Image (spheres, rainbow, N blue to C red):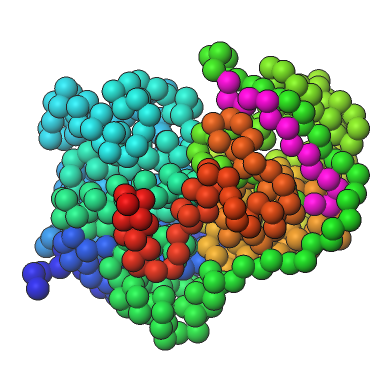
Amino acid sequence: MSEPLLVIKDLVAEGYQEDRWSPILRGVSLSLQKGEVLGLIGESGAGKSTLGISAMGHMRPGCRIVSGSIMFDGIDMATAAEETLRKMRGVRIAYVAQSAAAAFNPAHTLMQQFTETPVFHGVMDYKEAEKAAQNLFKVLGLPDPQEFGNRYPHQVSGGQLQRAMVAMAMACNPDLIIFDEPTTALDVTTQIEVLVAIKDAIRNFDTAALYITHDLAVVSQIADRIMVLRNGQEVETGDTRQIIEAPTQEYTRALVTVHHKHDEKNHPDDRDAEVLVMQNVSASYGSGVKILDDVSITVTRGKTVALVGESGSGKSTAARVITGLLPQDTGTISFQGTPLAPSFKDRPKDLLRRIQMIYQMPDVALNPRMMIADVIGRPLEFYFDITGEEQRNLVSELLGKIELDDSYLDRYPSELSGGEKQRVCIARALAAQPDLIVCDEITSALDPLVAEGILQLLQDLQDELAVSYLFITHDLATVKAISNEIVVMHKGRVVEQGPREEILAPPHHKYTELLLSSVPEMDPDWLKNLIQHRKA
């Protein structure tokens, strides 16, 4: 076997918070061969992302490497000069971030941002880079690849933006790519396309990869080996099939068990009053092209309606219309029998309080200049005039509900992991004591154990307070676990809706069948078998 491309040995890293340095990585070691994919998996805060980006010789602000070495093709990235690192980043080592919306510059087109790295490093001229971008856009299944790069980040869906970031990482044919949750924001059908594209790129260019994720089913499709991390330490490392079929450590067994577990509770069948009624709603973003076309959805008190469909199907647009962020073109929306004004600006404060939304991407939903105590405390002050010590005590209680302690009160969002940020967003919504919560992919950034806890928390709150949920997701396992009703959307229209048991039981609508068949299984051969089946 040839010399490893990447060798990290006894890496110790720390983060500064609460006036002291705390450990993030506690002596982690790994090696990676050229063309090999190592999956890094573990709960939020385990150190996965810190370990991944350390391969680039980078540490986030407030973090530092204490000891250990990071050898990439003979160069110690932990001690290399900044000039050396700049020449390698984007060319020999590339990074795909978890939140594309936070990573792209909103003032520049996607093509301008794609071409910047290869042109700056002299790998290609602009015309060559533009051609490479169009080819990669086509490979990744992006619409109208010849013109797609002329769009700005806000003009494409979240799934399309994530694929554009994967294309940017592949621009210079790097030796190593760090994928940090690259399919977290994608629906199941788009996820398949991106996973296939990533696998093809790795095979065709003999690229090595560190694949960071909390989804064992996803990582089992692409990784040769898997390293499980917890509290900054290695739990176990092994061949992918061994990790998912015969894990040796209790923590790994717990991760595997959570994935297999579909908590299909017996929800009460009694029908309560209608909370939200959306009738024949159509909406567009000003281009004249309908994003929603004659959509009708009903949510009853104390129940959960799951809204599913691929990226660009109109799920999040429906949420924006319901919350008044995007006025509808036609149709009506009523809340507890009261017609809702199309714009949130024309709705009374009490109605605003009763409908809350938790966004998909916490990185862009939290004010980076506000401490967590102020983020969660803002609804308490705005809706209930609660301030001072009483507000802080209530914020502390809400943190407890989302399994965070009081040490988070005086932290900024940048000091939290992705999963912790999303839990703060959930607490902020709960602070308003709403009757309806619109949840837009709220568990997509969480590891399985934390996600299970959040779903259980939402279920407990629903049982206690009879709060209703419109749960937007591409995770069919989550749909099975929490929903009473399912609404399936495709290209802005509702193609099927009804009770969970009816929608999930065969025979299925053709599009629903496509979604269900695209849910990854924890079998390393699943993706290969799926592709073969669809070709047949």
State the predominant SS element of the stretch in magenta: strand
What residue is shown at x 55% (from left), y 65% (from top)?
448
* Horizontal and vertical percent position of residue 317: 62, 31
Q: In this view, does 279 lie above or below 460?
A: above
Q: Is residue 242 above or below residue 356?
A: below
* Horizontal and vertical percent position of residue 440: 62, 44
Would residue 143 be found to the left or right of residue 297 on screen? left
Q: Give the range drawn in magenta.
A: 290-303
* Horizontal and vertical percent position of residue 285: 58, 19
Would residue 148 be found to the left or right of residue 470 on screen? left
For the residue pair 30 and 156, the one nearer the viewer reads as 156
For the residue pair 294 and 366, the one nearer the viewer reads as 294
Does residue 178 appear anywhere in the picture? no
Does residue 87 appear anywhere in the picture? yes
Would residue 415 be found to the left or right of residue 382 on screen? left
Q: In which quarter of the image is residue 308?
A: top right
What residue is shown at x 15% (from left), y 55% (from top)?
206
